[in-house]
Amino acid sequence: MELGGGARVPPPRRVAAPGALRRLGRVSSSAEPNPYTIRPEGADPAEPVTGLREIEIELAKRWPENKIEPSLDRIRALMDILGEPQRAYPTIHITGTNGKTSTARMIEQLLNTFELRTGRYTSPHVESVTERISLDGRPISEDRFAETYRDIEPYIRMVDEQQPVALSFFEVLTGMAYAAFADAPVDVAVIEVGMGGSWDATNVIDAAVSVITPISLDHTDKLGSTTGEIAVEKSGIIKPGALAVVAQQPLDAAQTILKRAVEVDATVAREGMEFGVLHREVAVGGQLLTLRGLGGAEYEDVFIPLHGEHQAHNAALALAAVEGFFGVGAARQGQLDVDKVRQAFAGVSSPGRLEVVRRSPTILLDAAHNPEGARVTAAAVSEAFGFTRLIGVIGTSGDKDVTGVLEAFEPILAEVVVTQNSTHRAMAVDSLAAQAVEVFGEDRVVVEPRLDDAIDAAVTLAEEEGDLGGAGVLVTGSVITVGEARLLLGKK
């Protein structure tokens, strides 16, 4: 592999044991430090907070997203003092384990195509915190983000003083999103939970439509050790008299969701029964679908520029949710304008979800961070790409089922380069290497502590057989790893 100046970098050395580390040249300058890693001390609370970077530093003093105290008291207090901005517009609420952000983006695109002004709140972000709060499909500007924070900052401090626990990072951002959407104003907001459902800070809305994507094991220390237990928390977003649009689920999760729906007298639309994917085929740059909507009508020749069977099911969920929002299917009849549906799906994007960011060799980014997400990503790669040699770059968080993720990717990866992202949640590279050796064997594992070096190493390994057309690199394991790789690779 050649870097700047034509110098040739020697191929990376495989790891004989965790700790046998090697460095290569850099892809580009390092990414900006992630705000979650910053723990500033001694900041003057009276000093005015101005730009985006200063706000990120201020927010980073609060509890991070992986630390929660299960209560809606703080966010309710903030909403109350702000005048209940979350009730100024109808909402569609999304929970589940995997597929939430992609489904949210599809719903947003459909609503935009039907000429509604939308707000979308998703997490975590891939590159910039501003991505979490979008208006009409675009992240709000840095100036507007800063202005929103400054507007509600005095009220945030009031709530902090009144509560035994201060508002968390995620709770503050949720308050900002709800305030920004009311200020816009939007016609409808698409809201993704941060974690779980019942106790999630977003759950101060009364959504007319709730969407539950596939539930699998993740955050088991906080949500439960079985999919049925996790479904108890996630089904808490289903509101009385509302519509719940539910993906195909494990049996115990499905039973829990249906029980909740009965308790609150909600209507349930189940994938595979009231709506679903009738046909799909791989197409250039994505896939071509036939979807059945809530009214029983078929939507044919729907192209989505996303890879994998899971994205087809996300599309079916999104379509059913928007149909339900517009009232289609209440009497098992009717459908949305087919041409507008096709137009909407053709324009969908989902950064960091099997996203191609470079060619020769192909470099893919995918945010899979739990075993089920890794399994569907591996299946999608096998289906959509004809790689003869695929190298993985994996950097995970320490609180995940890392062995499960590695085992899911093992069949499709010739070798794996283990690395570490910049956050305090990242698994130490030597610990990750030890688990990778158990799954892949010593001869298939390379260790590079820095992400830029890891990508270089993977590209060198992919090129070893000389067939660039069939060589590829998959960067995965964490949304944060993917976001930092996206910055390194200059993807905008």
Image (tube, rainbow, N blue to C red):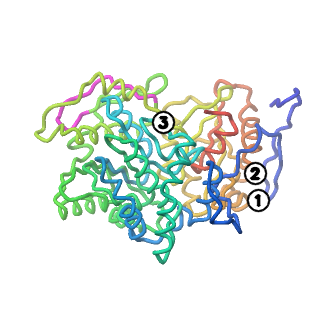
Q: Amino acid at mark 3?
A: Arg
Return the residue nearer the eye: 9 or 115. 115
Q: Which mark is residue 447?
A: 2
Q: Is residue 88 above or below residue 397?
A: above
The disc placed on residue 138 is 3
The kind of residue on which mark 2 rests is Val
Residue 424, given in percent of the width and then of the height, sits at 66, 61
Q: Residues within 10 Å of mark 3 (few under 14, many from 20)?
A: some
181 lies left or right of 146: left
Quarter placement of the C terminus = top right
Residue at the extreme left of the image, as rendered:
331
On residue 18, the disc is 1
Residue at the location (32% across, 53% down)? 249
Question: What span is in magenta?
Answer: 292-305
Pointer 1 with pointer 2, Cβ within 8 A: yes
Q: Marks 1 and 2, Cα distance to the nearest angstrom?
A: 8 Å
